[in-house]
Image: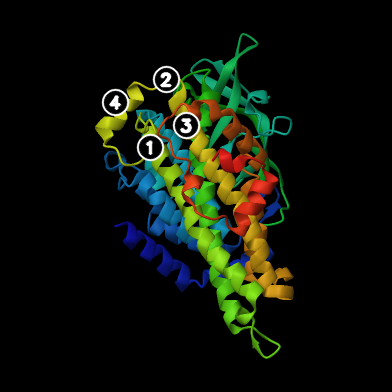
Amino acid sequence: MVFEVESTIKSILEKHNIREEARNWDHTGVKLVDGKVILPDTFLKVVNEIIQENQLLSFYVPEELGGLGFGDSIHGPITEVLAGYDFAMEIFILISASVIESLLLYHKEDYNKVIKEFTEGKRLGYVAFTEPQAGSNLENIKATSEKVGDEYVLNGTKIFITNGGYANTGLFLAQNIVNGKREGTNVFLVDNLDGITTLRLEEKSGLHVSPTAQLQFENVTVPEEYIISDVGNGYRKVLDRLMGMRVGVSYQTVAAAKRAFEVSLDYAQNREQFGRQIIEFPEVRRKLKQMMIQIPRMEDYTYQAAVMLERYKLGWIPYDAGIHQTPEEEINAANNAPPGLIPVLAHYLASCSKLYTSEIVNQFLYDAQQIFGGMGFIAETEVNKIARDVRITSIYEGTSEIHNWVINRAQKQIDSLTDFERPYRKYQERTIYENILFTRFPDLDKKI
């Protein structure tokens, strides 16, 4: 069934000649006109065909809630297909899966109508966590939520909001204010745009057709049932949800690396210099060979992190982070694990995947542009667009430096796992991209 979904999406994207059309979208971008976010008509036509006519988001929803019940198992392949055609379109569509994920993880019957409308393509998601003064330190947010009767009133300014101002359904992180004092944080489901103003759209180096907005929430009211999980415990729930977004970034990098290799190989086989194809030059061949070796390693990190995250959501994770035990053995090991080890291990693997793949894909695209020579610097070429788009992968969902800190902080617990095999150790020789990574982050090769 997964292959049928991939095939359907590919046929839609090919029918609309998306790789060529994406260049037009990249040039046109998004605009803010009289407070309204405007996207290219052809872009919205393709998106609606995917999520409305073919109900892509139904694949992330259990059957008992009106979906097809594939969940996380389909996230990777779908991300790779969409991102391989247009990075911005993939983000625009699949950030909704992050919202759906939260509504399912902390499910209440009150969410069912919203979930159903996601499956029908009537809703599009956003996540409003980041604030100007807080950045990645979400505990420092200033946005507030205060209970008034049976509702909560939300106020605050959020920045760097993907799909902000256009999407109609989001998650909002705020301080929990009780009698004028802060008592933890809350995450809310916000199911309409009432009281939300788009203050500006950011001009970015890449992802030009993906709106990134600054939003003002002014006395936005939501029913108390729309608190995600427990009152006052929003920050911890956010951290759990961020793992899925980080693994999603790794899927994006794999898609970008595969496409960059394809276009680089094709160009090298057809571009002639000094009377021969440039693929015959040793340095070009070496770069292509290193790319070919590198891609499966990126896949390895990504899919291992995804498997572990799925098991973590089930309430257990392999004690040694292997994937060869039976569920019963793993549940037993999880029940006997030291307190706090399991979430540390899950965060560690997500951070390893995110840091490794996002740093490497940026160096990967540097070489891809080198193969193209001067054409690699021309904005309208596909390799240039990919390079501009992937630059964000080592920045959003936690910078590489933050993930390096998470990895370092986890070492004591990881070292307590006597049978744990660090993913990197299985590779016999370093690639040129790994050499650069471990130069930028010294001793990382001993920690991932």
Badge 1 crowding class, 10 Å Cα cut-off, few under 14, some 14 to 19, many 20 or more, is few
**Image quadrant where residue 3 sits:** bottom left
Q: Earlier in the sequence, mark 2 or mark 1?
A: 1
- Tell me whether circle 3 and circle 4 mark residues in contact (CB < 8 Å): no
Q: Which residue is mark 2?
A: 338
Q: Which residue is mark 1?
A: 113
**Image quadrant where residue 329 sits:** top left
Residue under the point 73% across and 34% down: 132
x%, y% of residue 60? 37, 45
Of 351 and 170, the residue lying toward us: 351
Whether 359 is drawn above or below 313: the answer is below
Q: Which residue is mark 4?
A: 332
Q: Earlier in the sequence, mark 1 or mark 3?
A: 1
User: What is the three-letter code of the residue carrying label 4?
Assistant: Asn
User: What is the three-letter code of the residue carrying label 3?
Assistant: Leu
x%, y% of residue 206? 67, 57
Q: Is residue 364 visible?
A: yes
Distance from Cα at disc 1 to Cα at disc 4: 37 Å
Badge 4 crowding class, 10 Å Cα cut-off, few under 14, some 14 to 19, many 20 or more, is some
Residue, far top: 179
Q: Which residue is mark 3?
A: 345
Q: Is 350 placed left or right of 183 in the picture? A: left
Distance from Cα at disc 2 to Cα at disc 1: 40 Å
Badge 2 crowding class, 10 Å Cα cut-off, few under 14, some 14 to 19, many 20 or more, is few
User: What is the three-letter code of the residue carrying label 1?
Assistant: Lys
Distance from Cα at disc 1 to Cα at disc 3: 35 Å
User: What is the three-letter code of the residue carrying label 2?
Assistant: Pro
- Tell me whether circle 1 and circle 3 mark residues in contact (CB < 8 Å): no
Q: Earlier in the sequence, mark 3 or mark 4?
A: 4
Distance from Cα at disc 3 to Cα at disc 4: 16 Å
Mark 1 vs mark 4: give the one in front.
4
User: Could you tell me which secondary element the residue under label 1 belongs to?
Assistant: helix
